[in-house]
Amino acid sequence: MKVSVSKWSKYKLMKQNKVLADYLPETQIFKKGTLWSMLKRHETVVIKPNFGRLGYKILKVNSLGDDHYNIHYGRKVNHFYGQVPTRNYINQITNKKRVIQQYIPLATIDEAPFDFRVMLQRKKGSNDWFVTGKAAKVSFPGYFVTNASVQVLTVEEAINKSNLRNKVKMIELQKKLDNLGFETARYLQKYFPKRTEIGLDVGIDKRGNFWIIEANYRPSINMFEIMQDQSFYQNIVDFRASPERYKETESPEKNDLLPENKVISNTTNPAGNFLTSLIKRFIRPGSQN
């Protein structure tokens, strides 16, 4: 049976995976009732088209209490009083099928939120996935979505410039991103067997917790092209041209992504508490991890 690549379909599939479920922000189909119930639980939510790319028509809705609401769309923030005008404005932006998602207060660089893109690829007919690129997308001033990126940095550059620079351990963070990528790609492959590329968007919030924002099956690689270090972009392009050159460099071991090992920062262990045993990793021959 063919499975839709919509945001809602992928969310429902990943929610069934006991490893991935704990990293997913609550997501529902947008309906009249779910908007208000989600706002009651989370105070701030994000509304996205069920099918869509590049941050198109994404809104953030914040409940201020006493039936007052702010809606952040693009750079503009509009204030509304009452549920009817609030919902009417949302429907003016888009009335197609949408999902509503728990808002994640992402870590920031100079008050601009950022998240990570993990690019994974595999050879046609193979079950072996390769992490061929990782980058941090930093939003434009005034935007809350990172699709509108003012700069693209390496993972290490982003953390060192961010409000998390003294709260996370770089080696563990890099492994965590790889592990989330591998687990997501391998699991979803069962439902999308013809797909050979996936771009996983992973957020890290201000406390150091990891969140899977979205799994993209038509990932743009433009962000890698504009990075100062072109090695990731070249990896991705080279893999598309001749994936047979990529070889497995380590045997697989059990990963460290079980829900009880999810990173939750605290004052005594700001990097979180999760196992650091190595799992299957891939690199392009002759390149660095």
Image (tube, rainbow, N blue to C red):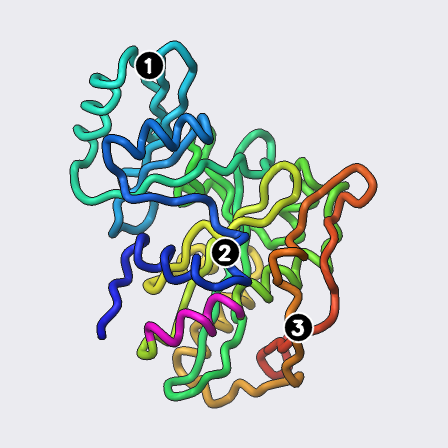
Residue in the image at 45% along x and 71% along y: 187
Q: Nearer the viewer, mark 3 or mark 1?
A: 1
Q: Nearer the viewer, mark 1 or mark 2?
A: 2
The quarter of the picture where residue 134 lies is: bottom right
Gap in angstroms between the C-alphas marked 3 and 1: 49 Å
Q: Is residue 227 magenta?
A: no
| Residue 21 circle label | 2
Residue in the image at 44% along x and 55% along y: 223
Q: What's under tag 1, amino acid-wise? A: His
Contact check, label 1 and label 2, Cβ < 8 Å: no
Residue in the image at 47% along x and 40% along y: 150
Q: Which residues are magenta?
A: 183-192
Whichever of callouts 2 and 3 sits on the residue coming sooner in the sequence is: 2
The quarter in which the C terminus is drawn is bottom right
Q: Is residue 37 above or below residue 217?
A: above
Gap in angstroms between the C-alphas marked 1 and 2: 34 Å
Gap in angstroms between the C-alphas marked 2 and 3: 31 Å
Whichever of callouts 3 and 1 sits on the residue coming sooner in the sequence is: 1
- Residue at disc 1, secondary structure: strand
* Circle 1 residue: 79
| Residue 288 circle label | 3
Q: Residues within 10 Å of mark 3 (few under 14, many from 20)?
A: few
Q: What's under tag 3, amino acid-wise? A: Gln
